[in-house]
Each structure stands twice: as C-alpha cells, then as structure tokens.
Image (tube, helix red, strand yellow):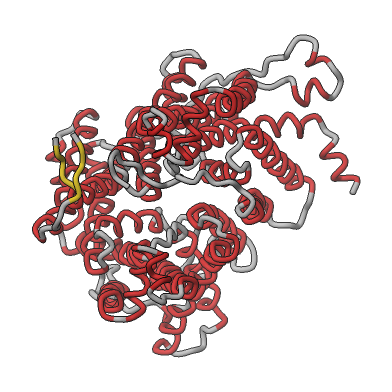
C-alpha cells in the first residue's frame, strides 16, 4: 500500500475538502462530548442556536469573527510565502496597545474622520514593528522564524502588561491593570444599533477581497507565491527573496496589528492582558481551514467564531466544558491537513 | 555588586537552577531526539501541557507519583505517534502539524481537566515529589543543599541526558537515528527503515516531553492550571538549536538558561523600582539571543523537516 500523486485535482474535491475536514473534526469532538455524558447532536445544535439563534447572538458571532478574519489573513498571507509567522498573538497586542496609547490622549483632539483611520494605521504599524525582529533574524542569521515569533508572543504580552501596569495604567480602574480607555469618538461606529457589531467587520471583509486581488492579480502576489512554492526557483526567475519576504512579513504583521487595533476600537475601548483569547493562534487554524484562500478565511473565521460563541451557552446548559470549542477548532486544523493531503495523493495498493 | 555575589553565593539559587532546568532538560532532549531523526516536533508545548495535566490527574485519583510520571510519558508517546502519522507517513508540513498538535493537546488538556475537576476557588492539590537527600553528599556544606537535595525526577533527567548522549553517539541505534536525520535515502541503502526510526524517535522524544510537563505539576508545583507551561516548550526548541543538536550541550544549555531564570527571579525581589515584567521577559529574550548567536554555527540535521516517502525522491 502506498501513496501516489494525483495527476489532477478535481474542483469538487477542493471545495469538499474543508467541509469534510470540519465534519471529521466535529465527529471526533462528538465522541469526546459523548464520553462526557451528553448527546453530541444536542451539543452542536445548542452551539448553532447559541451562535445564530437570535439577532443579538448572530451579531456577537460576527463581532467575534472580525479579529479572526484579520489574524487568519495575517497567517494566510505569510504561510503562502512559507513565512511561518506564528507571532500574530503578540502583533495583535502590539496593535492594541499602540491604539490605546495614541487614542487615549495623544491624538484625542483630532476629529473622528481623521482619528479613526490614523489609529488603524498606527495599529498596523505597531504589528509590523514586532515582526521586524523575526524577519531580520531570519534574513541576517538564518534563524527559524517559527521559534522567534512564538517566543516574542510572550515578550509582547509582558510588555503590554508592563505598560498597563505603569505609564498607560488607567487610574480609575480600582488598581486593576487596565489601560486608559480611548476617547469616545475614536470608537468605531456600530453597524447595527444596540449590538456590538461594528464597522470593523466590513473592513475585514474588504481587506480579504483586496488581498485576494493582490494574490491573484499583482506581481507581488505572484512573487510571494513563488517564494513559498520554491525559493530557489523564485530566485532563478528573478524574484528577490529578501525584499519579498520583508513585504510579506509587513503585510502579515500589519494585519495582525490591525486586528488588535480594531478589537480595541470596536469592542473594548481599552487593553487588558486577556484582550485576546488566542486570536493569533486561532488565526492559524482559520487560514489553514481556508486553504490559505483570503475569501475562504472569512467563512472559516465565522465557523470558528460560531464554535466559540455558541460553546458558552451550550456549556451552561449541558455542563460540557466550553473548551470543547478549542478542541474542535484545533482538530479541524489537523483533519484539514489530512484532507488536503488526500486531494494531492491517492491510496494505491 | 555585593548583591550579585550574595545571589550567586546562595545555595538556594543553585537548588532552584536544577529545579527550573528539569522540565527544560526533559523537553529539550525530547525535541532533540525527534530532530536528530529529521522531524521537528512543535507539538512540544501542547504535549508538555497534556503531560502536566494527565500526570497530575492520575496522582489526584490515587496513583503514586512514579505512575503519574509514567502515564504522562505514555500520553506523550501517543501524541508522538499521532505526530508521526501526520509528518512521517503522510509527510505533511511539520510546522503546521506541530502547531496543530500543540493547539489540540493543550485545549484537550483543559477540556479533560475541566470535565473531571469542577471549578473551585483554590485549585485542588496533590502531594508532590519530596527532595531526597543523597547520603553523604547532601551533608557537605553549600554543595549539599545546592546540588544534592533535589526531587528524584531531577536526577532522573540528568541521567537520561547522559544515556541519550551515549545512545546517540555510541550505539547502532544512535547511528541509525543520526543517519535518518542526515540522509534517509542513504540510511535506507544501509538497510535501515527510516520510517520506523522516525516513528521511534518521535514517540520516545514526545514521551520525554510529557515527563517534562508532569514534572511541573508533580514536583515544581502541586496543582494544574491552564497556560502553566508558559512557553517552556518553545524555549526547549530554541535550546536544541543552542545545543547544536548535542545532548550534552542540551543539558548544559538548559542549566545555563535555568541559571539566568533563577537569577532574575531573585533579582526581582531584591531590586526595587523596576517593573517585574522586565525580569520576566529576560528568559524569553535570552533564548532569542542564543538562537541568533548559535544558528550559524549550529550543525542542523540535513534532512530536518524533509518528508521521506519510500520510492519518492
């Protein structure tokens, strides 16, 4: 029995793959739910109802999906060029704290139409600042960026913790380490009144569309793809590997920083060290589930957000720990990897 | 200056160095074994978390401490088997499978823990390993309390480091592992089955990672809580590069790293006016610096991260 490379990849397989992967992940997680003594079908039904059962819960799910779309794009952009940026979590916090710093007093006098775009740009730049270190170490000393970008996540959270415990601390937060809040008019306008859904969601979708265009229709998109498929081939074709990777890194880090900025300006208004329940890491799953397709990222992010938002209510009513959402999401990354493999290979005996 | 001398001169510091180093020694050796056979195992962070959880849980449910450690090792081995299926048999991206393993193993740990142990104000505890005094040596002034009053798993970790160094460089098995990591095709030509070697190395390596995690809950602390591994797994991956894939240097690297960590912990209480986070950052920053310095000189196994399929070039 051995694996044989498929000559062609039928389109239906490419579309079915993520669906099969998700079904497989749900099936495995369903066994874990059953072992815990509940019906898997009921648990998933409650997750679905909890995430989309009402107008309010649907908007909550989309609000939760917003940072996941952006961190998912951050991972998709980087992974396409085989740049393993696993530092989205830290870049998210850098974007968030930069916005809190500039939006709470420094730029607070600007009117909203100038302030909000400026803050979003600042957030993106802050994300880029953090990714400079791993990309520089890779190009200069050929250090694997996986480890450095991962380790920098811990440094970034500690750095944020230091700032919100020090210079940026909100004096009115009863000693709780929390940053000063951004001024009211810096907050992103709501998309639907009396919900938390804000214009960050359409912004994220627009960015997915723009990146999809960049990937498929521009020279830079082709170069970054070539750098990922075959670095030596790319060099042979005249692609300058270093500058291409730096651009990819800036785009990736910028998107992750933007995710942090939008989460602060759209939802919280201030920064704590639990602002992100792992958005950076979940972005990796989102990107893989989407097979690195920017538009697919939107759907994958909504699926992931659905699991997280729905699991809370399900957990309260059935007594199954809400960590089952994290388990399912992580499993779907692994099943997706396997499913992707079988779009490329077939089993021969 | 006096302060620094005081810190370095205290037996407590050196005892702490060994304690902090233990999970790193287990983890680094585990990662090293996998990488020597050509497989990067980024599942380490999650496997350590799972080992910490399952080791603690079994002791909490009445097994003795050594059985807890063994169960953590077995659980680590099972995750290693899963990682092998993905990266060796299927030849998937070792980066992405490893990260997936970490996400899965850690969220699965939290799920199982939450399912079995209900939410409580203070987390339940077990009686951890107690330090054993080595007869004779532990009564020597300074040296005794500094180096010979550790818990048994610490001594075990050091012994395992020496055993692995011996196996890797002095036995046919070690040669097979190194060949598979350098050139699996050549290994196959010698009658070695690279697939089996990789499976073996990854399973045993992952078992060591599980033990490293269990040390945290069964010796360093006495309870389990989410995110307790705190990036130790990633630091181990960095230490493997620092050690240039040599077990002896891995032991030295883990001890050196633990020395800085123990040192900053004491400095933290001794120095006022500096935010404590600055001290907490130093171990992470140090490991990045170590990577930058050593990466060029390090001898990477040539077939690291290259999938091997029979009959495919």
Outermost residue, front direction? B189
| Left or right: B195 as drawn, with respect to B224 | left
Is residue A101 toward the left or the right of residue B77 in the image? right
A191 on left or right of A182: left
Q: Is residue A329 above or below residue A105?
A: above
Name the quadrant of the C terminus of chain A: top left
Percent coordinates x, y for residue A204 in the rendering: 30, 73
Q: Residue at x 28, y 73 (%)?
A: A208
Location of the N terminus of chain A by quadrant is top left
Position in image of residue B144 (x %, y %): 80, 20
* A317 in relation to A220, above or below: above
**Residue closer to the observer: B305 or B192:** B192
Which residue is the extreme one toward the left?
A: A12
Q: Position of residue A318 (x, y in %)?
A: 21, 37
Is B264 left, or right, of B154 in this rendering? right
Q: How many marks?
A: 0
Q: Which is more toward the observer, A184 or B186? A: B186
Taking the spot 43% from the left edge, 58% from the top edge, the residue there is: A84
- Residue A157 pos. (x, y %): 54, 57
Residue B277 visible from this viewpoint: no
Residue B165 in which image quadrant: top right
Res. B156 in view: yes
Q: Would you identify the image quadrant in which residue B26 lies?
A: top right
Tell me the residue at 53%/30% (across/down). Answer: B212
**Given the current orientation, which residue lies at the most extreme right position?**
B2
Up/down of B206 relative to A159, above or below = above
């Amino acid at each position: 029995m051995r694996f044989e490379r498929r000559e062609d990849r039928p389109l239906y397989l490419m579309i079915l793959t993520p669906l099969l992967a998700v079904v497989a992940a749900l099936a495995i997680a369903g066994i874990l739910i059953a072992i815990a003594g509940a019906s898997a079908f009921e648990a998933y039904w409650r997750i679905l109802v909890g995430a989309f059962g009402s107008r309010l819960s649907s908007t909550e799910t989309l609000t939760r999906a917003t940072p996941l779309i952006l961190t998912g794009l951050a991972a998709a952009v980087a992974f396409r060029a085989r740049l393993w940026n696993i530092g989205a979590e830290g870049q998210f916090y850098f974007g968030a704290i930069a916005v809190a710093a500039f939006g709470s007093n420094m730029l607070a006098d600007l009117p909203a139409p100038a302030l909000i775009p400026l803050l979003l740009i600042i957030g993106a730049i802050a994300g880029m600042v953090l990714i400079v270190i791993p990309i520089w170490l890779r190009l200069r000393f050929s250090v694997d960026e996986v480890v450095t970008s991962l380790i920098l996540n811990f440094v970034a959270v500690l750095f944020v913790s230091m700032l919100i415990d020090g210079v940026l601390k909100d004096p009115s937060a009863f000693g709780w380490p929390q940053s000063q809040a951004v001024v009211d008019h810096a907050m992103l306008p709501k998309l639907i009144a009396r919900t938390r859904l804000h214009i960050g969601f359409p912004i994220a979708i627009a960015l997915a569309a723009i990146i999809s265009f960049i990937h498929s229709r521009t020279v830079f998109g082709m170069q970054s793809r070539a750098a990922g498929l075959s670095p030596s081939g790319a060099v042979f074709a005249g692609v300058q590997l270093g500058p291409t990777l730096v651009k990819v890194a800036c785009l990736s880090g910028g998107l992750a920083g933007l995710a942090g900025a939008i989460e602060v300006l759209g939802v919280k208004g201030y920064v704590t060290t639990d602002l992100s329940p792992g958005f950076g890491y979940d972005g990796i799953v989102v990107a893989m589930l989407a097979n690195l397709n920017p538009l697919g990222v939107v759907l994958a992010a909504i699926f992931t957000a659905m699991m997280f938002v729905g699991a809370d209510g399900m957990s309260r009513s059935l007594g199954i720990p809400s960590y089952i959402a994290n388990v399912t999401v992580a499993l779907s990354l692994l099943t997706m990897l396997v499913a992707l493999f079988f779009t490329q290979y077939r089993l021969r005996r | 200056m006096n302060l620094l001398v005081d810190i370095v001169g205290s037996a407590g510091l050196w005892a702490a160095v060994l304690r902090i180093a233990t999970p790193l020694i287990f983890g680094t050796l585990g990662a090293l074994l996998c990488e020597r056979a050509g497989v990067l195992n980024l599942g380490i962070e999650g496997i350590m978390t799972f080992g910490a959880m399952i080791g603690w849980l079994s002791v909490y449910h009445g097994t003795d401490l050594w059985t807890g450690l063994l169960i953590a090792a077995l659980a680590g081995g099972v995750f290693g088997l899963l990682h092998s299926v993905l990266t060796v048999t299927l030849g998937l991206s070792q980066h992405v499978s490893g990260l997936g393993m970490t996400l899965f193993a850690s969220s699965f740990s939290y799920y199982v823990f939450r399912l079995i142990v209900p939410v409580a104000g203070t987390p339940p505890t077990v009686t951890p390993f107690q330090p054993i005094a080595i007869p004779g040596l532990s009564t020597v002034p300074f040296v005794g309390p500094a180096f010979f009053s550790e818990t048994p798993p610490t001594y075990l970790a050091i012994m395992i480091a020496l055993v692995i160094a011996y196996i890797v460089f002095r036995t046919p098995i070690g040669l097979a592992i190194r060949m598979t990591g350098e050139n699996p095709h050549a290994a196959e030509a010698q009658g070695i089955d690279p697939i089996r070697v990789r499976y073996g190395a990854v399973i045993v390596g992952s078992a060591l990672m599980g033990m490293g995690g269990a040390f945290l809950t069964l010796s360093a602390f006495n309870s389990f809580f989410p995110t307790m591994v705190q990036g130790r797994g990633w630091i181990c991956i960095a230490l493997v590069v620092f050690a240039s894939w040599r077990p002896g240097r891995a032991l030295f690297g883990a001890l050196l790293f633990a020395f800085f960590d123990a040192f900053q912990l004491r400095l933290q209480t001794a120095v006022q006016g500096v935010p404590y986070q600055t001290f907490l950052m130093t171990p992470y920053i140090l490991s990045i610096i170590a990577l930058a310095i050593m990466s060029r000189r390090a001898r990477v196994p040539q077939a690291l991260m290259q999938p091997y399929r029979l009959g495919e070039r």
